[in-house]
Amino acid sequence: MRVITGTARGRRLGELTGMDTRPTTDRVKEGLFNIIQFDIEGRRVLDLFAGTGQLGIECLSRGAAHCTFVDQRKDAVALVRKNLDATELSDRAKVFQGDALSFLGSAGERYHLIFLDPPYDANLLNSTLNRIAVIDILAENGIIICESRADQDLPELPLPYRKSKDYRYGKIKVTLYRKGC
């Protein structure tokens, strides 16, 4: 797993062992960043369910102003910190260990991009989306990027949030929600 482009281009990222974490595949990551490439520079990013941190790190490498990483697993948080050090991007990042839904309630700031890639079998995606809409931590014109199984139905959210588009990559679906556009 490597950073695709930007200041950390080509840097190898560490991966978690075992089957508890499913990193975003290169094909999905490349497609995803082609979609949002003009929405990254200077933005604040939240990588919820961060795992290895590869999505947030890719954003930082491409010029995001700041990224907050959250994961419940202690080993994942340690790996995110290690990957940030390896890419020399730690100065624009915060890393938190804890429950994603609890974090959302105490975030205290707005984000321009929010990545949601929870474990598929945990059934956390819908509840997390709804919590984000209620707490309203997405900045105006911000984007929520969700990765899920291709057959998973994701909810409509109340205005000013709207489901924008689905992109399919085999068995994986990336869904974008936008606020106020």
Image: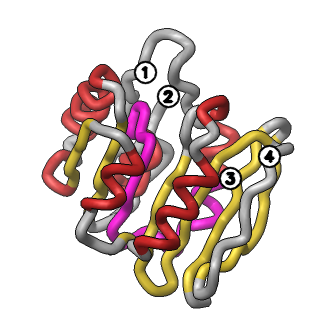
Instruction: Pinpoint residue 167: horizontal percent, then vertical percent.
Output: 78, 57
Please name the residue shown 48% across and 72% down the image: 134
State which mark lies toward you, 1 or 2.
1
Range drawn in magenta: 32-53
Disc 2 element:
loop
Which quadrant of the figure has residue 73?
top left
Under circle 4, the secondary element is loop
Instruction: Name which residue type carries label 2.
Output: Met
Separation of residues labelled 3 and 1 (CA atoms): 21 Å
Do callouts 3 and 2 mark residues in contact (Cβ within 8 Å)?
no
Q: Which residue is mark 2?
A: 1
Give me the disc on residue 49: none
Q: Secondary structure at mark 3?
A: helix
Which residue is at the front of the view, 88 or 102?
A: 102
Disc nearest the viewer among 4 and 2: 4
Residue 37 highlighted magenta (yes or no)? yes
Residue under label 4: 152
From the image, tell me which residue sits under label 3: 31
**Residue at position x 24%, y 26% from top?**
78
Q: Can you tell which quarter of the image residue 148 is in?
A: top right
The disc, 1 or 2, on the residue closer to the chain's N-terminal end is 2
